[in-house]
Amino acid sequence: GAVVSQHPSWVICKSGTSVKIECRSLDFQATTMFWYRQFPKQSLMLMATSNEGSKATYEQGVEKDKFLINHASLTLSTLTVTSAHPEDSSFYICSARDRLAGSNEQFFGPGTRLTVL
Amino acid sequence: GDSVTQMEGPVTLSEEAFLTINCTYTATGYPSLFWYVQYPGEGLQLLLKATKADDKGSNKGFEATYRKETTSFHLEKGSVQVSDSAVYFCGEGSQGNLIFGKGTKLSVKP
């Protein structure tokens, strides 16, 4: 149980285009999902917290107009990188918290590798 | 604010060696503590967790004990295998969020 999927697993796009990444909780309901960006040398940066039915909460320094987050249902959150540029190339990871579980454990997706040419 | 500090890698060990990866945290209250593992090219997987002081989390031969007096949650394994090569993240969770350390890359040589 507690499986989170991401789609696509990798994507290559041209500079200036927009890319949408989906994050799905497959066997549980997630009122809260999180989006991370992983930089070289492995460090993880929390980009935003996505709450079902409301606006995402962005971390300081993250451009909300560039990284659009939508959490329209209890099992799906999307991250859209708008007008992508090479510096947006990275590994994007989502996670979800089971709304019925008591702990703060998060279940992570497998990640999406974005390369912007 | 809350933070997690874990030993910087990379850590290189021979197969069957003893592993310790140190992790300390700062937090108000009583956070849950986690170790996640990331294998090459994959997302993070929960390795073990502890939700209160003196709890010991264990999985796949790895162990970590929640030490409130030293605010630590060190990861240990008695005999590592090549398949344990990965990046290990220590995390603390309170107020609904997870705060991670910077990760420690472990390489195990045969």
Image: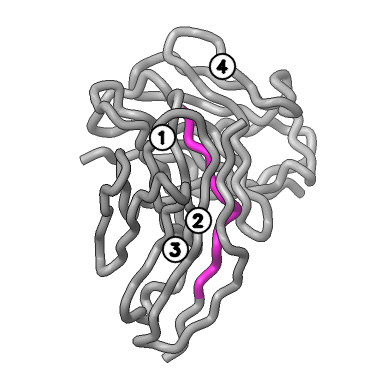
> Mark 1, chain letter?
B
- Which comes sooner in the sequence, label 2 or label 3? 2
> Mark 4, chain letter?
A
Disc 4 with disc 1 on a shared chain: no
Name the kind of residue labelled 2 in the image. Answer: Cys
**Residue at the spot 54% in from the left edge and 33% down from the top edge:** A35
Name the kind of residue labelled 1 in the image. Answer: Pro
How far apart are labels 2 and 4 at the CA level?
A: 30 Å
**Residue at the spot 36% in from the left edge and 76% down from the top edge:** B83
Residue receiving disc 4: A56
- The residue segment tinted magenta is B97-106
How far apart are labels 4 and 1 at the CA level?
A: 24 Å
Q: Secondary structure at mark 3?
A: loop
**Residue at the spot 32% in from the left edge and 81% down from the top edge:** B79
Residue receiving disc 3: B39
The crowding category of the residue bearing disc 1, from other C-alpha atoms within 10 Å (few below 14, some 14 to 19, many at least 20), is: many
**Residue at the spot 79% in from the left edge and 39% down from the top edge:** A85
- What is the x, y in percent for residue A45? 62, 41
- The part of the image, by quadrant, that contains residue B96 is top left
